[in-house]
Image (spheres, rainbow, N blue to C red):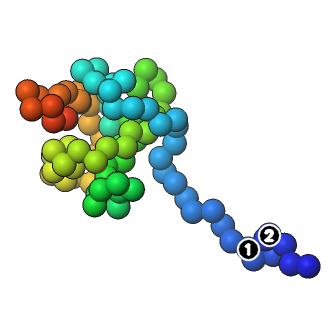
Amino acid sequence: MTTFKDFNIKAPESNFTGEKIKIDKVLNTAIEVLDFKIEKGNFSDQRLVLQIEYKNEKRVIFSSSRCLIDMINQVPAGQKFTTTIIKDDSDRYQFS
């Protein structure tokens, strides 16, 4: 009988590591964004995936915030940066 190992299929590489963290847990706190990508969302057209460092640990944030996606699209690819995610008066998430 053939085993899965015989297919020589490799797991896709993921450059995002660490436990998922809710965006509200890092709200109004300085974080370092190490990497990001925009992909098809489960519940929306697009979602933002952030690889961050928070309290000296790598974590991953998922967000479908249109404002965050529009803002991060203006950041050069591969650029690390420090930011704080805030909620404005309209309850939209923003980088500051």
Asked if residue 69 lies left or right of residue 3, the reply is left
Evaluate whether residue 96 shows in this view: no
- Outermost residue toward the left? 89
Crowd band around label 2 with a 10 angstrom C-alpha radius: few (<14), some (14–19), many (20+):
few
Q: Secondary structure at mark 1?
A: loop
Crowd band around label 1 with a 10 angstrom C-alpha radius: few (<14), some (14–19), many (20+):
few
Asked if residue 76 lies left or right of residue 78, the reply is left
Asked if residue 94 lies left or right of residue 59, the reply is left
Q: Image height check: is 42 above or below 3?
A: above
Residue nearer the viewer, 56 or 94: 94
Residue 28, position in %: x, y? 24, 21
Evaluate whether residue 12 shows in this view: yes
Residue 21, position in %: x, y? 43, 32
Identify the residue at horizontal 81%, vertical 75% (top origin): 6
Q: Which quadrant of the figure contains the C terminus?
A: top left
Residue 57, position in %: x, y? 48, 27
- Outermost residue toward the front? 43
Identify the residue at horizontal 31%, vertical 44% (top origin): 63
User: Which residue is tagged 2?
Assistant: 5
Q: Amino acid at mark 1?
A: Asn
Residue nearer the viewer, 81 or 67: 67
Q: Secondary structure at mark 2?
A: helix
Residue 44, position in %: x, y? 30, 56
> What's the mark number on residue 8?
1
Give residue 9's quadrant in the image: bottom right
Identify the residue at horizontal 57%, vertical 62% (top origin): 12
Marks 1,2: beta carbons within 8 A = yes
